[in-house]
Amino acid sequence: MTQPRWTDDDELLADLRAALGRATPASARELEGARAAFTWRTVDAELATLSYDSLLDDRVLVRGAATAPRSLVFDAPDLTVELEVTGERLVGQLVPPGPGDVVLQTADGRESPVPADDAGCFSVAAPPGTRIRLRCTTPSATVVTDWVRT
């Protein structure tokens, strides 16, 4: 192994500038590979599938304006995520109840992390019409929900 020739930070920074100056833009194939590798970051998470959506419930098909919040339930073997869409917020609970971390992910890549309290309850902003999914992590499980539009 060779010894670095840098004796101070200025020499190191000069070498880094020179190396970055020779960099070429990534090819389409390299970008595709990077995106594919990025999707593997949640490979160990279970998929929580949508098992109930109040918009699809036959009882909603009545005359008049719907005033009840939309309810969604996602089921995975070790964790259920229950949600209510109320205006511009999602209010939810992890079942079985317990503390955890919830990250709302939008289709454009933005993430909004929020904690779930000891009862598994959480609340996060979600503008109407946004395509979202949740990544929920508890001491016993990590699940990622299906994509839905709020």
Image (cartoon, rainbow, N blue to C red):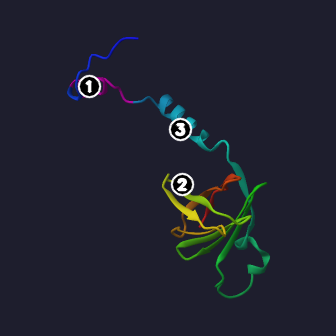
Inter-mark Cα distance, 2 to 1? 39 Å
Q: Considering the numbered disc 3 on the image, is that residue within a helix, a strand or a loop?
A: helix
Inter-mark Cα distance, 2 to 3? 14 Å
Q: Which residue is mark 1?
A: 12
> Is the magenta region chiefly helix, strand or loop?
helix
Above or below residue 35? Residue 86 is: below
User: Which mark's residue is nearer the viewer, 1 or 3?
Assistant: 1
Image quarter hosting the N terminus: top left
Residue appearing at x 29%, y 26% in the figure: 16
Q: Residues within 10 Å of mark 1 (few under 14, many from 20)?
A: some
Find residue 118 and report its image quarter.
Answer: bottom right
Of label 2 and label 3, which has the lower sequence position? 3
For this view, does 65 lie left or right of residue 4? right
Q: Which residues are magenta?
A: 11-25
Residue appearing at x 66%, y 42% in the figure: 43
Find residue 38 and report its image quarter.
Answer: top right
Q: Which residue is mark 2?
A: 107
